[in-house]
Amino acid sequence: MNSTQTPESQLEKLGIELGKPRSAVGNYVGCVRTGNLIFTSGQGVDQYHGKLGKDLSVEEGYAASRQSMINLITVLKHELGDLSKVKRVVKILGMVNSAPDFTQQPKVMDGASDLLVEVFGEKGKHARSAVGMAQLPNNTAIEIEMIVEVEE
């Protein structure tokens, strides 16, 4: 991404339209801002359910993590108004609903990581943890949370 492109123009180029943030399914908010950091709540996906390595392939998991990141970018857009205020994506935590012998969580989470770099360029490069979970809420395939540094 060159300096004249914005995250919004990158999203448009990728054919991604951001809608409204998903509603919370409990007593929490989609994100909390403290100082120049935004901590998001975990975002799952409505389109992909089941366990990676049993019900879903690595490729489907990649697509699910990409969609989960679109949901997270939607939360950021709603909070900031302008995604150019993102100074740096600091860290993401990817939780993958995994069959007991599934070990390819990092390949699944590349869907989210690749999208962040496509949208934010160097600012999208981040630290990451990709872990397998025995179960996720509503049997969703993926849940991701993120920490972002912002500037006004």
Image (tube, rainbow, N blue to C red):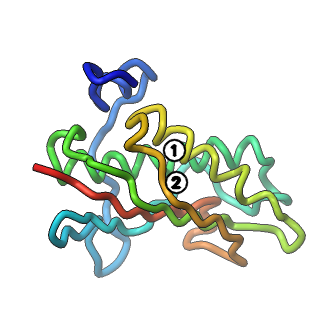
Q: Nearer the viewer, residue 137 or 87?
A: 87
> What amino acid is found at the position of numbered circle 2 in the picture?
Val
- Location of residue 140 by image quarter: bottom right
Q: Position of residue 109 (x, y in %)?
A: 63, 53
Q: Which numbered circle lies on residue 67?
A: 1
Q: Position of residue 25 (x, y in %)?
A: 37, 71
- Location of residue 100 by image quarter: bottom right
> What amino acid is found at the position of numbered circle 1 in the picture?
Gln
How far, Cα to Cα, is label 2 from label 1?
7 Å
Q: Nearer the viewer, mark 2 or mark 1?
A: 1
Q: Which numbered circle lies on residue 116?
A: none
**Is residue 44 depicted above or below 125 in this figure?**
below
Q: Nearer the viewer, residue 20 or 120?
A: 120
Q: Nearer the viewer, residue 74 or 10?
A: 10
Q: Position of residue 47 (x, y in %)?
A: 57, 47
| Circle 2: element type | loop
Q: Nearer the viewer, residue 90 or 142?
A: 90
Q: Which residue is mark 2?
A: 45
Left or right: residue 95 compared with residue 82: right
